[in-house]
Amino acid sequence: MHRAWIVAGVAFVATVGAAGFRATPGVLINPLRQEFGWSLSAISAAVSINLILFGVTAPFAAALMERFGIRRVVASALVLVAAGSGLTVFMRASWQLILCWGVLVGLGTGSMAMSFVAMVTGRWFVKRRGIVTGVLTAGGATGQLAFLPVLASLTARYGWRSAALTVAGCALAVVPLIVFFLRDHPASVGLPAYGADEVQAPPVRTTGAARRATTALRDAARTGTFWLLAGSFAICGATTNGLIGTHFIPAAHDHGMPQTTAAGLLALVGAFDIVGTVASGWLTDRYDSRLLLAMYYGLRGLSLLVLPGLLAATLHPSMLVFVLFYGLDWIATVPPTIALCRERFGDAGPVVFGWVFASHQVGAALAASAAGFIHDQTGRYDAAFYLAGLLALGAAALSFGIRRPRVQLRVAFAE
C-alpha cells in the first residue's frame, strides 16, 4: 500500500476531529443560556468569532505548512483546541466564552480546515485526487455524525462541562497519530506521489508565511474567478455552518423537538453528507466543476425555502426527506471548489483556496450572528431560513458565471 493512503487516513482522523470540535457550540447554546442567562446574541458572537477565525486562519495555516511542515502545524492546532475547550469549564462571563471557544478553538480548527485537505491531496496524490478530496472533506460530516449525538447525550446527563472536557481529551488523543504517522511530503520518505512516476523534491519556501499568504491573495484578487468563487463560497458557509450548523438545534427546539432528537437529525445530515461529498469528488474528476457548483447551490436554496414549514415537535417523513436531501448537498461544494482553485491558480491553489475558505467562514459568521439577532427580535428563525434560501440561489448564478478558460492557463504567483 502506498504511503499516501496512510497519510490520507491520518488526515481524515484530524478533519473528523476538527469538524466535531467546531460543531459542538450547537449543543451548548441552550445549556449556556439556562445556566448563565446569556442572550442568544451574546453566545452567537462567540460562535461568529470562532467561524471567522476558522476561515481567516486557513490561508496562513497553509503557508505555515509550506514553511514548517504539515505535521508541526496540525499537532500545534490540536493542542490549541484542547486548551480552548478545556478552559471553558472555568468561565463565568461571556467574554471568556469568546476567548476560549471563539479565539483558541477557532485558531486550532482553522489550522485543520479545508486548506489542510488541499495541501495533503495536492502533495500526495496525482491520481484519484478528486475522490480523495471528497473523502477527506466528508471527514467533516463524519465529525458531526460521531460527536454530536455523544456530546448531546453527555450534556443532557452530566451537563455541558462534560462535553467540553470530552472535546479536549479527544483533541489531545489525536496528537500522537499526527506526530508518528503524518508526513509533510512524499519526497521526505523517498516516494513519488500516488500516481506519479518519479520523486519530486518539495518546493523550498524562503519567504515568510504571512507574505506568502498575502501575495497569493493579491494576485488571485486580480481575477474575476477568485471573486466569484469567494462570493459563492461565502454563501455556502452562511447556509451550512453559520445557519444550520449553529441554529438548527435551537430552531427545532423552539417547535418542541427534544434537543437530543434535533442533534440526532443534524448528525444524520452528516451521515448523508459523507455519501454526497464522496460522490461529489468522483463527479469532480469527470465533469465541469462550475456546473456542479451551480447545481449544488440551486438545490440547497430550494430546500431551505421549504424548511420552516417542516419543523415540528415530532419527526415526520417530510423532515427526514429534507435531512436526506440537505445532507447529500451539505459540503459537496468543496471538491469542485478546490479543483477550480488548483486549475486556475496552479501551485498556489491551496493557499488561494485558503482565502476562498476564509470567505466561507466570514459568511458563516455573519449568518450565525444574523440568525441570532433575527430570533431575538422576532422569536422565530423563519426569516433567516428564507433569506438563506434566496442567497443560495444567488450562489448558483455566481458559479454558473465562472468562465471556462479558452486554454488551460495557470496564474504564476510571485514568492
Image (cartoon, helix red, strand yellow):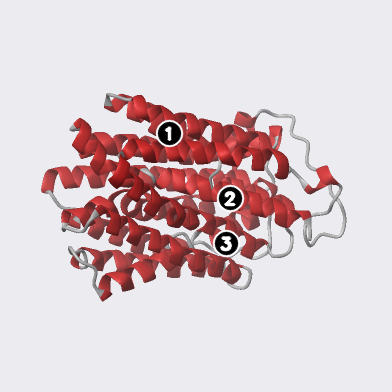
Q: Residues within 10 Å of mark 3 (few under 14, many from 20)?
A: many
Percent position of residue 33, x then y: 21, 37
Of labels 2 and 1, earlier in sequence is 2
Percent position of residue 350, x then y: 62, 47
Q: Is residue 118 left or right of residue 33?
A: right
User: What amino acid type should be assigned to the residue bearing mark 3?
Assistant: Gly
For label 3, the residue is 134
Give the residue at x 41% y 55%.
Answer: 236
Verify CB contact (< 8 Å) between mark 2 and mark 3.
Answer: no
Percent position of residue 357, x then y: 50, 47
Of labels 2 and 3, earlier in sequence is 2
State the mark number for residue 85. Answer: 1
Q: Residues within 10 Å of mark 2 (few under 14, many from 20)?
A: some
User: What amino acid type should be assigned to the residue bearing mark 1?
Assistant: Ser
Q: Kindly report the distance in space between the C-alpha atoms of the residues bearing marks 2 and 1.
A: 19 Å
Q: Is residue 8 left or right of residue 77?
A: right
Name the one closer to the observer, 197 or 415.
Answer: 197
Q: Check the image and report above or below for 12 versus 354.
A: below
Verify CB contact (< 8 Å) between mark 2 and mark 1.
Answer: no
Percent position of residue 110, x then y: 51, 39
Q: Kindly report the distance in space between the C-alpha atoms of the residues bearing marks 1 and 3.
A: 28 Å
State the quadrant of the N terminus.
Answer: bottom right
Name the one closer to the observer, 88 or 235.
Answer: 88
State the mark number for residue 13. Answer: 2
Of labels 1 and 3, earlier in sequence is 1
